[in-house]
Image (tube, rainbow, N blue to C red):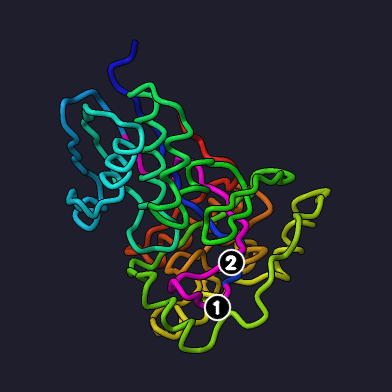
Amino acid sequence: MPTSFSTFAPAKVNLFLHVGPAKANGRHDLDSLVVFAGPEAADRLTVEPSDILTLSVTGPGAEKAGTGGDNLVLKAARALQAEAGIKHGAALHLEKSLPVAAGIGGGSADAAAALRLLTRLWDINPRHARAVAPQLGGDVPVALLGQPAFMRGEGERVEPVRLPAPIPAVLFNPGMACPTGPVFAAFDAADGGAGFAECGPLPEFADMGELIDWLAGQRNDLEAPALTLHAALKSPEWSLNGPKSPLMTRMSGSGATFVCLYATLDAARESAESLRAQQPEAWVRATLLGGADLS
């Protein structure tokens, strides 16, 4: 039997995000079509047997992610331990490559990876992971599934969907943090969420062009408040022109990461190279969006 398990924790992308008004519990109903990046835009988590729970973190985002009790990996491990009645621990190691507070669910992806790996390491029923996922954050249940899906309710309702094909894309983060709390507060202050309604089942698309045409009629309700809060935050579209022009550009989540959709992966890679040359401080990844590579 293996003595350790490892998996990617890929970036989550909101192809659209509709947000309802604040509820009595302070949270919001959501309606979002969620997909996942490839291994080019992912953290990686490894777990090994241990008597106690420990977490080590390396990589470009290690300092911001931290190893304290507020790290979602440790929160997920402790919640799963309690839910399943597990007495022993695990040594967890996170290679943190995704930017923090970036609207791509990095912490949630890490938590979901911990739930998957510890389910295997401790040989427990996966229902325990599904039970604790919603309490860890709105993005954790969909990240646990790791497949294209509608994310609804407060994130606890996850409905898998079928896309015509993986979507070539560039993920662009200018190197600034955009914490979720203030963005939702600005959304609430502007009386956001009026007229909120779920968009219904996903249509059957014959090809990628039909999907992108449909997405163009949707929106991200958190994009405007994020741009208002962070005046320096600008879409990369201004610097992409000619053959590098994306078919569509939209902010993911509460920002500050933008997703640019393309017809081909080669076009996405060319645009990513152009963006890196113009803004070397930015985090830029060309990838295919769809189901997560959990190997």
Instruction: Give the magenta range.
Output: 20-45
Q: Position of residue 155 (x, y in %)?
A: 52, 57
How far is the residue under mark 1 from the one under mark 2? 13 Å
Q: Residue furthest bottom?
A: 190
Dominant secondary-structure state across the stretch colored magenta: strand
Judging by the rendered image, the residue that carries numbered circle 1 is 21
Residue 42 is a magenta residue: yes
Image quadrant occupied by the C terminus: top left
- Please report the residue visible at 43 percent of the width from the left and 46 percent of the height from the top: 133
Residue at horizontal 23 percent and vertical 55 percent from the top? 70
Query: Which three-letter amino acid code belongs to the residue tagged 2?
Result: Leu
Dot 2 lies on which element? strand
Q: Position of residue 165 (x, y in %)?
A: 70, 43
Relative to 182, residue 37 above or below: above
Mark on residue 17? Answer: 2
* Quarter of the image that includes the N terminus: top left
- State whether residue 32 is above or below residue 239: above
Relative horizontal placement of residue 216, taking residue 127 as reference (left or right): right
Q: Residue at x 40, y 25 (%)?
A: 124
> Residue 9 is drawn in which quadrant?
top left
Tell me if residue 65 is in the magenta stretch.
no
The amino acid beneath tag 1 is: Pro
Q: Residue 108 appears at what percent x and percent y? A: 40, 51
Where disc 1 sits, the SS reads: strand
